[in-house]
Amino acid sequence: MSESVSVRCPACRREHLYEATAYPCACGAPVAPALDPHAAATAVTHRVWDDEWIGVRCTACGRENEWPRPELGCPCGTVLRVPVARAEPGHGQQADMGSSAQQADPAGSAGSAQRKAPAARRVFQPITIRTARDAVTAAAVYLRWLGYRDLRRADQRPPAGIGIAAHGLLAQVDPTVRPASLRDVECLWLTAMTESVACVYFSLAGYAPEARARAETLGVPLFVLDLTGTPQPVNGLADELDATGAR
């Protein structure tokens, strides 16, 4: 568990006591970045995807994964980026959504990535969703739990939400407050078809009836992200993926 540090907001000068969120490693141990108590927090004025993630090594098993960079919301409205003692950027521009235990390369060398889920998976540990960023993180953590180890941001941006890619898989995470539409599901499926990969959709607000019906005919697993961060299967394809994991 990380130690608490004092964080001062550069905008209003308020001080906050902050402790980094711990995320579950593939081995089941909690992992949290080491915070730098001597460096000053900075205000987040704009977001760059490559700056959103840092490499953190699990002290229990030695795996290194990419996790969200620590942030804190000040009551004055400023979002603070909390400095870490050792911030390691992703492995190149395409390592945004996390590396494997073997630090797998992006799609070009993804053949060496380990995607097979453990025979007996540990209990899934969800990430509470408070923001759109949390929804993307929750979906990434779930996909890693299923056995996908080379997660990264997808090359093509979907019409809605954020795309996540892994070897053999394209996922779309829609954190908006509107149900995913028929077009959303079809666009994901078409993109996956052009890349010869499977696909899966995560929505925070559910799906329109015609989108659910079309997903059945196209073979697209649908999940709804509840606010606890636990993906709930919407169709039989999602039930099967949840039960079997990555294959």
Image (cartoon, rainbow, N blue to C red):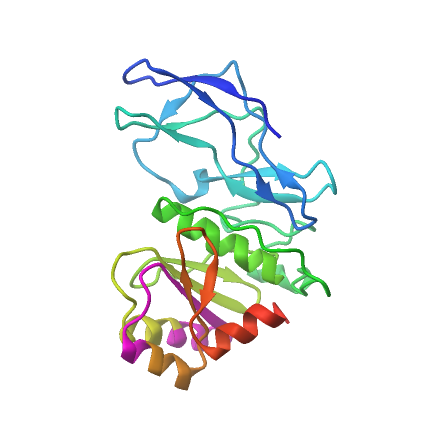
Left or right, 58 with respect to 164, comes to: right
Left or right, 70 with respect to 11, comes to: right
213 or 45: nearer the viewer: 213
Can you tell which quarter of the image residue 154 is in? bottom left
Can you tell which quarter of the image residue 163 is in? bottom left
Please name the residue shown 55% across and 75% down the image.
240
Quadrant containing the C terminus is: bottom right
Q: Position of residue 17 (x, y in %)?
A: 45, 20
- Number of labels in the image equals 0
Please name the residue shown 34% across and 73% down the image.
185
Q: Where is residue 167 in the image (x, y as percent from the top left)?
A: 57, 65
Kindly give the residue lying farthest to the bottom in the view shown: 217
199 or 234: nearer the viewer: 234
Please name the residue shown 62% across and 71% down the image.
244
Please name the residue shown 72% across and 63% down the image.
120
Above/below status of 115 relative to 91:
below
Quadrant containing the N terminus is: top right
Q: Where is residue 219 in the image (x, y as percent from the top left)?
A: 45, 81
Which range of residues does the magenta coloring cover? 189-211
Left or right, 39 with respect to 117, comes to: left
Q: Where is residue 8 in the image (x, y as percent from the top left)?
A: 39, 16
Above/below status of 170 relative to 236:
above
89 or 69: nearer the viewer: 69
Q: Is residue 30 in view?
A: yes
Above/below status of 118 relative to 10:
below
Above/below status of 223 relative to 144:
below
Q: Is residue 148 in view?
A: no
Q: Is residue 134 magenta?
A: no
